[in-house]
């Protein structure tokens, strides 16, 4: 009996399907007392039939011809019932003789083509820029605020400008130690969304005995799935059931089926965000108390006895900025959650408002009212709190509860620790090296440390332009490594595009970043002695800056591939070697240029180590076994 062709527009009407009797995939269908399944061998043939110009994977399973009668019965049921509707998947009309097998198409998941294999490098780079462009502004915001502090305070006092050096170490550099929260959030959210994309369909196909290796098969007329706007919907399922009412329940209404999976997936992502928000809040409160009670001691130990005159001004700055610690870390978690969902515009709006508040505050408090370093600290602190609030609101608009925090269980803490600990070691190594440069430059005199403060803030302002490339890799690579469209060749092409953008961006940043302090030093200070020290480090400044965007692309790919052990070990090695070089050049009288040459070596060592790792046969982009998906199991 031939199949009757079903059009895409046809509808399957059911009356009041009893969804309470619906058993989730974790429950074996064969154990249901009211359903008729029979033990039989798995389908003899299984083929993948990807349709051209179709965004859906079609898994073609071949079932027994006895299901023809089931299909006929189900169509009769469809004509008799009117009520809740569920779309029916379409089938090609096919003549099937007695004893022949019939092809039944099952859509098992979406086919996302954000970075298709046949896509040109130019188009791929365009998509990267569309995502990383807004993300660039997110990374620029923090260094921009510090650079504004430097420019405004430098116009008034060289002493306060020098005091910003140790002050920003405690406020800005130490905040990057907690970047593991940001990286862990975006990585966990992006990976969870990539993996969950294929779970529902594969679980159902496995549970129904349509996958190789299954010990059960059922009399199925058809089973169809579709993915529209990232919403998984059951279109039609017809089987031979003991009670016709259960056939109604089997043809799951769209709302019930979609709710079961979407709500569970969303709850998982929500829970991850909630526990990371709790960790961010806890770390922020601890840092607030640290700055309050130990800030002056830390500044005194950092500056040393020769520069004790810098401590009062630096402590004023630290105490005010320290009030924003909880808001800063919570804002980072909320921002990274949005980026993990591939949304860079929501956080951008928040930081645009915060930057406007910061600039206005500096003009009013410092330029007009003359509050100096204290006014700059208040302006920056208030803008950070506003940014965090708007970041949380942006996450709320996506349907998540950003004000909901959850205390993580020991097992959840262990899971986060496994991901965050190597990232923490990486960030501590990086921040410690930058802090060591400031430490050694502090012993070289007020003018030298003031010049270094200008150059390091300019460097920080430029270097973050490469961070969106790292974020792009962390947001899009997991989909190509773990997701339903897993393809290492696509991931390699994506990295190639990121490196091309990194080379171009690095050269532009090196030229522009070097030109500003070289041609317009008066923007930062009117002191000729400070300008002279600034000009001595322009060449190493260029070489350290030019390689940074490519380094971020490589390290972002390693983070996306969870190659965290190598990343932490390589960064620790670079820090150890760099610290030794810093100590040698400082004691040998090479001054500030020697410190910046050590920074050049630190940056290029990171680049070559990461590149070698990714190009190795065992790297995350070439080892198929490294990310081999585990065997699918029907619970």
Image (cartoon, rainbow, N blue to C red):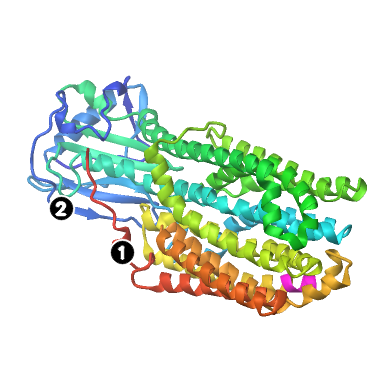
Q: Which corner quadrant holds the C terminus?
A: top left
Q: How would you rate the neighbour count of disc 2 (Cα within 10 Å): few for under 14, some for 14-19, many for 20 or more?
A: some
Disc tally is 2
Q: Is residue 283 above or below residue 443?
A: above
Q: Give the magenta-colored segment's residue range.
A: 513-518
User: x%, y% of residue 560?
Assistant: 45, 57
Tag shown at residue 624: 1
User: Image quadrant of residue 558?
Assistant: bottom left
Q: Residue furthest front?
A: 305
Residue 97 in percent (x, y) is at 10, 47
At mark 2, the secondary structure is loop
- For the residues labelled 2 and 1, the Cα–Cα distance comes to 26 Å
Quarter of the figure with residue 165: bottom right
Taking the spot 50% from the left edge, 49% from the top edge, the residue there is 186
- The crowding category of the residue bearing disc 1, from other C-alpha atoms within 10 Å (few below 14, some 14 to 19, many at least 20), is some
Which numbered disc flags the more N-terminal residue, 2 or 1? 2
Q: Residue, x 47% and y 36% (percent of image)?
A: 270
Q: Nearer the viewer, residue 502 or 453?
A: 453
Asked if residue 244 is positioned above or below residue 97 in the image, the reply reads above
- 516 magenta-colored: yes
């Amino acid at each position: 009996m031939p199949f009757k062709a079903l059009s895409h527009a046809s509808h399957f009407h059911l009356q009041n399907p009893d969804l309470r009797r619906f058993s989730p995939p974790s429950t074996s269908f064969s154990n249901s007392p009211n359903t008729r399944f029979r033990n039989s061998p798995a389908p003899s043939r299984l083929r993948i039939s990807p349709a051209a110009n179709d965004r859906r994977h079609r898994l073609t399973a071949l079932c027994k011809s006895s299901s023809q009668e089931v299909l006929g019965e189900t169509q009769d049921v469809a004509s008799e019932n009117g009520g809740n509707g569920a779309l029916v998947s379409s089938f090609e009309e096919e003549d099937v003789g007695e004893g022949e097998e019939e092809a039944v198409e099952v859509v098992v998941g979406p086919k996302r083509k954000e970075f298709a294999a046949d896509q040109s490098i130019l188009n791929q780079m365009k998509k990267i820029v569309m995502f990383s462009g807004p993300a660039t502004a997110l990374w620029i915001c923090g260094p921009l605020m510090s650079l504004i502090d430097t420019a405004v305070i430098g116009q008034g006092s060289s002493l306060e400008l020098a005091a910003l050096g140790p002050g920003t170490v405690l406020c800005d550099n130490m905040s990057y130690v907690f970047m593991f929260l940001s990286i862990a959030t975006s990585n966990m959210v992006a990976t969870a969304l990539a993996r969950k994309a294929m779970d529902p369909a594969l679980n159902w196909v496995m549970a129904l005995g349509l996958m190789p290796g299954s010990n059960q098969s059922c009399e199925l007329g058809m089973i169809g799935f579709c993915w529209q706007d990232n919403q998984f919907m059951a279109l039609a399922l017809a089987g031979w059931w003991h009670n016709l009412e259960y056939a109604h329940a089997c043809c799951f209404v769209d709302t019930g089926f979609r709710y079961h999976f979407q709500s569970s997936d969303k709850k998982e992502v929500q829970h991850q965000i909630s526990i990371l928000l709790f960790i961010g809040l806890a770390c922020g409160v601890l840092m607030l108390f640290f700055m309050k009670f130990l800030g002056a001691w830390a500044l005194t130990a950092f500056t040393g006895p020769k520069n004790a005159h810098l401590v009062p001004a630096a402590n004023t700055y630290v105490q005010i900025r320290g009030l924003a610690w909880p808001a800063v870390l919570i804002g980072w978690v909320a921002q990274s959650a949005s980026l993990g969902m591939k949304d860079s515009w929501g956080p951008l709006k928040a930081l645009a408002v915060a930057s406007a508040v910061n600039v206005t505050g500096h003009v009013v408090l410092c330029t007009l009212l003359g509050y100096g370093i204290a006014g700059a600290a208040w302006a920056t602190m208030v803008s950070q709190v506003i940014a965090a609030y708007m970041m949380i609101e942006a996450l709320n608009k996506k349907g998540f509860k950003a004000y909901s925090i959850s205390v993580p269980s020991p097992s959840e803490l262990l899971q986060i620790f496994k991901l965050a600990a190597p990232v923490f070691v990486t960030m501590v190594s990086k921040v410690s090296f930058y802090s060591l440069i400031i430490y050694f430059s502090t012993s070289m005199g007020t003018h030298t440390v003031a010049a270094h403060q200008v150059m390091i803030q300019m460097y920080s302002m430029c270097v973050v332009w490469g961070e969106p490339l790292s974020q792009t890799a962390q947001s899009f690579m997991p989909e190509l490594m773990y997701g339903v469209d897993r393809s290492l060749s696509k991931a390699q092409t994506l990295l190639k595009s990121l490196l091309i953008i990194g080379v171009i961006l690095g050269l532009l940043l090196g030229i522009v970043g070097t030109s500003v302090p070289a041609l317009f030093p008066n923007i930062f200070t009117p002191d000729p002695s400070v300008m002279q020290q600034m000009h001595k480090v322009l060449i190493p400044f260029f070489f350290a800056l030019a390689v940074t965007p490519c380094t971020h692309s490589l390290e972002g790919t390693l983070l996306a591939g969870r190659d965290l052990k190598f990343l932490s070990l390589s960064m620790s090695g670079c820090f150890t070697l760099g610290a030794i070089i810093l100590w040698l050049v400082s004691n040998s009288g090479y001054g500030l240029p020697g410190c910046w040459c050590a920074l050049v070596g630190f940056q290029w060592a990171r680049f070559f180590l990461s590149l070698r790792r990714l190009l190795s046969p065992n790297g995350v982009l070439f080892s198929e076994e490294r990310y081999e998906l585990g065997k699918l199991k029907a619970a």
